[in-house]
Amino acid sequence: MQVAEGGLSHMSGFVVFRKILRSDGIPGVFRGFGTNAVGALLTVYWVNRGLCHFRHKEWARVEEDSRRALVLDDTSVKGHYLLGCALLLKGNCALTVKEFDKASDLLKSSNSRDKMAEDI
């Protein structure tokens, strides 16, 4: 739902929030926050949840959570790395290489050196 539609621009913030929540649910509330602090927090949430599933070897859930994180922030190194690991165990080699390459490129551009960089 767009705020400019239906006279929402003339309503109070709380009324707009309720209207969005009723029509689009929780995802509608967070839509458009991919580049700010709330979006960053949600990305961290999905990546961390994916890491928990990774430790429990729940590969379908790792894939699902890493994809959710990447929808919010396509520059998440951990998101690409986790998705690559899940796809590798699924046997999808072409996409695995693509995700690991993306994670590696992002790490090189950030000049970060950590354990994940060695793994990739």
Image (cartoon, rainbow, N blue to C red):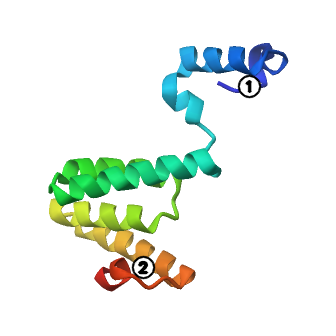
Please name the residue shown 51% across and 59% down the image: 74
Q: CA distance from mark 1 to mark 2?
A: 38 Å
Disc sitting over residue 42 in the figure = none
Residue nearest the viewer, comparing 111 with 3: 111
Q: Position of residue 64 (x, y in %)?
A: 31, 47
Is residue 31 visible in the rendered image? The answer is yes
Identify the element where label 1 is drawn: loop
In the image, residue 15 sits, relative to residue 96, either above or below, namely above
The three-letter code of the residue at mark 1 reads Val
Q: Position of residue 105 (x, y in %)?
A: 48, 79
Please indicate whether residue 1 sits to the left or right of residue 106 in the image: right
Disc sitting over residue 104 in the figure = 2
- Quadrant in which the C terminus is drawn: bottom left
Please name the residue shown 16% across and 63% down the image: 89
The residue at which mark 1 appears reads as 3
How would you rate the neighbour count of disc 2 (Cα within 10 Å): few for under 14, some for 14-19, many for 20 or more? Answer: many
In the image, residue 51 sits, relative to residue 98, either above or below, namely above
Residue nearest the viewer, comparing 21 with 55: 55
In the image, residue 113 sits, relative to residue 106, either above or below, namely below
- Quarter of the image where one finds residue 90: bottom left
Please name the residue shown 49% across and 82% down the image: 112
Please name the residue shown 55% across and 79% down the image: 110
- Quarter of the image where one finds residue 115: bottom left
Is residue 34 visible in the rendered image? The answer is no
Residue nearest the viewer, comparing 27 with 41: 41
The three-letter code of the residue at mark 2 reads Ser
- Quadrant in which the N terminus is drawn: top right
Q: Earlier in the sequence, mark 1 or mark 2?
A: 1
